Amino acid sequence: MAFHVLIATDGSAAAKAALKTAVRFPWPSGANASAVVARQVRADYRRSILLAALDRTAEFVGRTSARAMAKRWPAADARVVDAAPVEAIVGEARRVRADIVVMGWRGHGAVRRLLTGSVSRGVVRRAPCSVLVVRRMPRQVGHVVLGLDGSPYARRAVRLLGSFDVPPGARVTLFTAVDRMRTPAQGLAPAQVKHTVAAEVARINKERAQRARADLAKATKTLRAAGWRVNSIVTDGAPLRDLLRAVATTRADLLVVGARGVTGLRHLLLGSVAEGALNRSPVPVLIVR
């Protein structure tokens, strides 16, 4: 089955940026696409002039989106769904068996900052597939920063990038933060105990560094075989801080991270790095499942 891109749009500036990014993005060869427009109307407005206005607006957004997609996908269509945005987008992703959802990140300003990106975040948490969140359209996708953490999601991210139609000269910077154990305070413990503890901590840290290097080597091999130029950054600092620093210093066009779930609670379904990347990355963020 062909790789399917689902573009979620509402006609906003952020949604238009996401649509343009999707049309220009180096998806796998043979990929197809469709769009979804959410139209939510309260029951008591069903026969009002508001409904007619929303009908016209949603249909207009759908038509303009289809025309924009036709530049790359002549057969692409846009579907208007009567549901709340998150439900509409996630439901459509399941219906079309999307491999990725592309959407904008809508901000509401500093006063309403708790609502910033609420729909985008809701879709990322609940989508059955990967999600590309776009604040503004990149000029190109010539440089990608990919965060590796040894998780299955990170390995899937490597495979996904490896399937892309790689632009000439495009490169990937692989980033990993080695979680080094610190030697615990031991107070008045005997010297032999302190020595034993220090040796064990050193052994654990060596193993963690070796695993990180092995992950980097495997990812490098996969991506180079796909046509990417690859380099790497290894740090033992704060993962999110150093990841965002790598994005800034390398002038990346795209940040890719895995959606690393750590609990069954809905508000914690994203790993802290993925959540932080959504909140703070200056470039589009691809969250991979």
Image: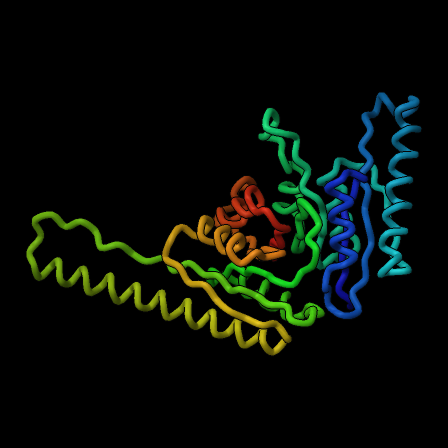
Asked if 68 appears above or below 279 in the picture, the reply is: below
Q: Please give the name of the residue rendered at 74% of the width and 38% of the height, measured from the top-left corner.
A: 85
Q: Is residue 32 left or right of residue 156?
A: right
Q: Tell how many labels.
A: 0
Q: Residue 22 appears in which quarter of the rendering?
A: bottom right
Image coordinates of residue 46 in percent, x first then y, are 89, 25
Quarter of the C terminus within the rendering: bottom right
Q: What residue appears at the point 90 percent right and 59 percent down from the top-left corner? A: 75
The reply, left or right, for residue 276 in relation to residue 43 is left
Residue 289 shows up from this direction: no
Do we see residue 28 in this rendering? yes
Residue 37, compared with residue 157, is above or below; it is above
Q: Name which quarter of the figure residue 221 lies in.
A: bottom right
Camera-side residue of 167 and 101: 167
Colour mapping? rainbow
Q: Quadrant of residue 199?
A: bottom left
Which image quadrant: the N terminus? Answer: bottom right
The residue drawn where x is 76% and y is 70% is: 29
Q: In the picture provided, is 26 more to the left or to the right than 208?
A: right
The image shows residue 223 at horizontal and vertical percentages of: 58, 72
Q: Position of residue 127 (x, y in %)?
A: 67, 49
| Residue 74 image position (x, y, % from top left) | 90, 60
Q: 24 or 157: nearer the eye? A: 24
